[in-house]
Amino acid sequence: MDNSGLFSLEKYRKQRLAPIEQWSPNIHYAQYQKLPTGTLNKRMIYDFELLYVRKGEAVTHVAEQRLVIPTGHLLFIPAGVYHRNEVTSTPSAQFIGIHFDFFHELHIVREEDLIVHPHKITESKFATEAVAEGFAPLSTRWLYIPTPSCVQLIEQLVHEFTMRSPGYLLICKAILLQILGLLLRSQKSYHHTNQPVHGDRILEMMNTIEQHPENQWNNRLLAEELNMNEDHMIKVFKKMAGMPPGEYIQMLRHREARRLLQETDASIEEIGRQVGYADIHYFSRIFRKSEGIPPRAYRKLSRIL
């Protein structure tokens, strides 16, 4: 992707070469979002944003480019760059938005403080991008394809930021550092040419599992579906997903269970069935192991917050 247009327009772009141990990110905003089809206002932000598309499709217009952002892709929006987002899927699209700075340099009181007002620009307020030696700045790419383990961290960050349990700021910082590290690693590691044999088929199967987490998936069934030896399938799956098939399936089920608890009034038993757990007691036990609280308490707390 040609980014020359991007950098020629970055009047307010600031960077600092800094060892990873000096990075001290501060999270200003981390939430699930659901937006209807349509175009949002053109804007510029003082900090940095990670925008992950959970479902649907979006487009970003920036530096005379039109970037399509499909499901499963992540957009990195730098400070000081005008852009305009658009939801192109019908009737809506679902996102995760995370705003942050790299060096804990911004004091944000309200979400509105993140947006630059064209008639009142404070140049000193633009956040500085950290650049690690041996890596290109994250802003040299607009789009990333996060691994499933990275997506899991993104969702965990939103959970911690929303629940605000004791010590959440420290935990959020640690999680965001892992996310940024994985995105840096992806610059060198995750390319189509480096995919193992059968990698494309594994990716297709991962997408099928994501669409139908309620199916009774297991290693034997997956190997049969892929026409692969079971041990080899597990090895390739782990390389592509960053985790074994069973862990990947449980992650997707848990993610869908949290969404249903937050967004619907379905009973706990029905939600368990929808994500693949026929036994409500087993579902509750698995959920509590991951979240620290049972499903009913999670629903109540998420709606209060």
Image: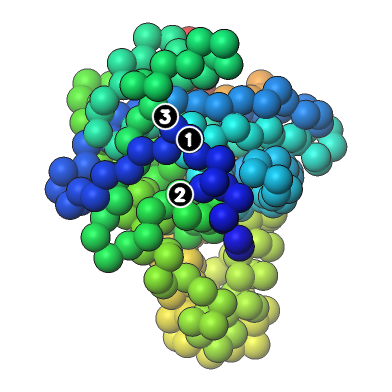
**Residue 11, x across and y down, in percent:** 48, 35
Residue 186 appears in the picture as rendered: yes
Residue of label 3: 47
Q: Does residue 303 sit above or below 192 in this rendering? A: above
Q: Does residue 148 sit above or below 204 in this rendering? A: above
**Residue 222, x across and y down, in percent:** 60, 75
Q: Is residue 174 left or right of residue 186?
A: left
- The amino acid on which the numbered mark 2 sits, given as a three-letter code, is Ser
- The amino acid on which the numbered mark 3 sits, given as a three-letter code, is Asp
Q: In the rendered structure, which disc, 3 or 2, sits on the residue that comes first in sequence?
A: 3
For the point 32% across and 43% down, the residue is 15
For the point 45% across and 49% down, the residue is 139
Task: Compute the Cα span from label 1 to label 3.
Answer: 14 Å
Residue of label 1: 11
Q: Is residue 115 left or right of residue 57?
A: left
Q: Nearer the viewer, residue 44 or 189?
A: 44
Q: Residues within 10 Å of mark 2 (few under 14, many from 20)?
A: some
Q: Residues within 10 Å of mark 3 (few under 14, many from 20)?
A: many
- The amino acid on which the numbered mark 1 sits, given as a three-letter code, is Lys
Q: Does residue 125 sit above or below 70 in this rendering? A: above
Q: In the rendered structure, which disc, 2 or 1, sits on the residue that comes first in sequence?
A: 1
Q: Residue furthest left?
A: 21
Residue of label 2: 139
For the point 55% across and 27% down, the residue is 44
Q: In the rendered structure, which disc, 1 or 3, sits on the residue that comes first in sequence?
A: 1
Q: Answer with the quarter of the image where residue 83 lies.
A: top right
For the residues carrying marks 1 and 3, which lies nearer the camera in this image? Answer: 1
Q: Is residue 65 left or right of residue 132?
A: right
Asked if the residue under mark 1 is in contact with the one under mark 2, i.e. CB atoms within 8 Å, the reply is no
**Residue 190, x across and y down, in percent:** 47, 70
**Residue 205, x across and y down, in percent:** 64, 69
Task: Compute the Cα span from label 3 to label 2.
Answer: 12 Å
